[in-house]
């Protein structure tokens, strides 16, 4: 895949930042192969990622997240009314999608992303953007 605009869902960031035994290598290779891509995520990622480090008083994980976001120049988009309305339309069409997933997908669509990287297999049915799982990239070298 040529360099593009890639939305990062929460799970790929967790795998990379917490050095997941199963997925860290895949994510490290992905970031290397897409070093010229523009990366996007949303404030929903922060809301999903930060609770466990806060609960465990592990501020090093929060610092690592913030450092990574800054170093990689990842655009962390706010969720505004157009994104919320798009998320509502997504939830109306895809009844099994959770609210947070719909907000993430809506942000990616409105940001004009070419790829949505997740590890939630059910999101691959979303038709407005190419949704790829970390499992997919490990087997297909995306």
Image (tube, rainbow, N blue to C red):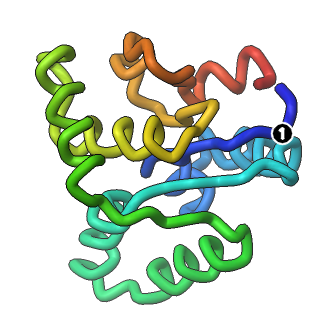
Residue name at image x 86 percent, y 31 percent:
2
- Pick whichever, 38 or 80, lies toward us: 80
Residue 120: x, y in percent?
A: 39, 28
Q: Please state the total of marks drawn on the protein image.
A: 1
Q: Which residue is mark 1?
A: 3
Residue found farthest to the front: 82
Residue name at image x 23 percent, y 26 percent:
90
- Pick whichever, 132 or 53, lies toward us: 132
Residue 122: x, y in percent?
A: 34, 17
- Pick whichever, 115 or 96, lies toward us: 115
Q: Residues within 10 Å of mark 1 (few under 14, many from 20)?
A: few
Residue name at image x 53 percent, y 74 percent:
65
Image quarter of residue 104? top left
Q: Is residue 11 left or right of residue 38?
A: left
Quarter of the picture holding the C terminus: top right
On screen, residue 78 above or below 86: below
On screen, residue 138 above or below 52: above
Q: Is residue 18 left or right of residue 37?
A: left
Q: Is residue 115 left or right of residue 129?
A: right
Residue name at image x 58 percent, y 38 percent:
113
Residue 8: x, y in percent?
A: 54, 47
Quarter of the picture holding the N terminus: top right
On screen, residue 12 above or below 68: above
- Pick whichever, 3 or 45, lies toward us: 3
Dot 1 lies on which element?
A: loop
Residue 115: x, y in percent?
A: 61, 31
């Amino acid at each position: 895949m040529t360099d593009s605009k890639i939305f990062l869902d929460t799970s790929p960031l967790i795998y990379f930042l917490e050095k997941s035994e199963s997925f860290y290598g895949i994510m490290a290779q992905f970031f290397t192969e897409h070093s010229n891509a523009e990366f996007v995520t949303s404030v929903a990622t922060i809301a999903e990622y930060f609770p466990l480090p806060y609960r465990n008083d592990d501020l090093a994980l929060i610092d690592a997240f913030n450092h990574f976001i800054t170093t990689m120049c990842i655009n962390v988009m706010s969720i505004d009314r157009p994104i919320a309305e798009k998320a509502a339309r997504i939830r109306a069409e895809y009844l099994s999608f959770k609210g947070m997933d719909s907000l993430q997908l809506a942000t990616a669509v409105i940001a004009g992303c070419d790829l949505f990287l997740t590890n939630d297999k059910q999101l691959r049915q979303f038709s407005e953007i190419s949704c790829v799982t970390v499992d997919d990239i490990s087997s297909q070298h995306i």
